Amino acid sequence: MEYYVSYIRALREDNDLTQQQIADILGTSQTMYARYERGANELPIRHLITLCKFYNVSADVILGLKRKR
């Protein structure tokens, strides 16, 4: 779990996006998204899929199962 928590934050920061912008894309609140980034709440599968499509990366990369090429 620790890997995806740091990776979704890094993706957001590398793309110069705010937590609010990503929360809007996911259809959730900024507070809830912040909890995903901190690892206080697990990221739902539907949000994982949305983030994969938005950032154009595989779930394996976000979950730390495979390195991005």
Image (spheres, grey):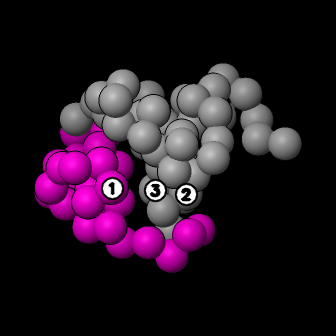
Q: Which residue is mark 1?
A: 25
Q: Which residue is mark 3?
A: 9
Residue drawn at (26%, 67%) of the image: 20
Decide: is 7 above or below 19. above
Q: Residue 5 sits in which quadrant?
A: top left
Q: Which residue is mark 2?
A: 11
Residue 36 located within the stretch drawn in magenta: yes
User: What x and y, as percent, mark residue 3?
Assistant: 53, 36
Nearest-to-viewer mark from 1 and 3: 1
Query: Is residue 2 visible in the rendered structure shown here?
Result: no
Assign a secondary structure to mark 2: helix
User: Mark 2 belongs to which amino acid?
Assistant: Leu
Q: Main secondary structure of the magenta part?
A: helix
Decide: is 19 above or below 16. above
The dot on residue 7 is: none
Q: Which residues are magenta?
A: 14-40
User: Mark 1 belongs to which amino acid?
Assistant: Ile
Q: CA distance from mark 2 to mark 3?
A: 5 Å
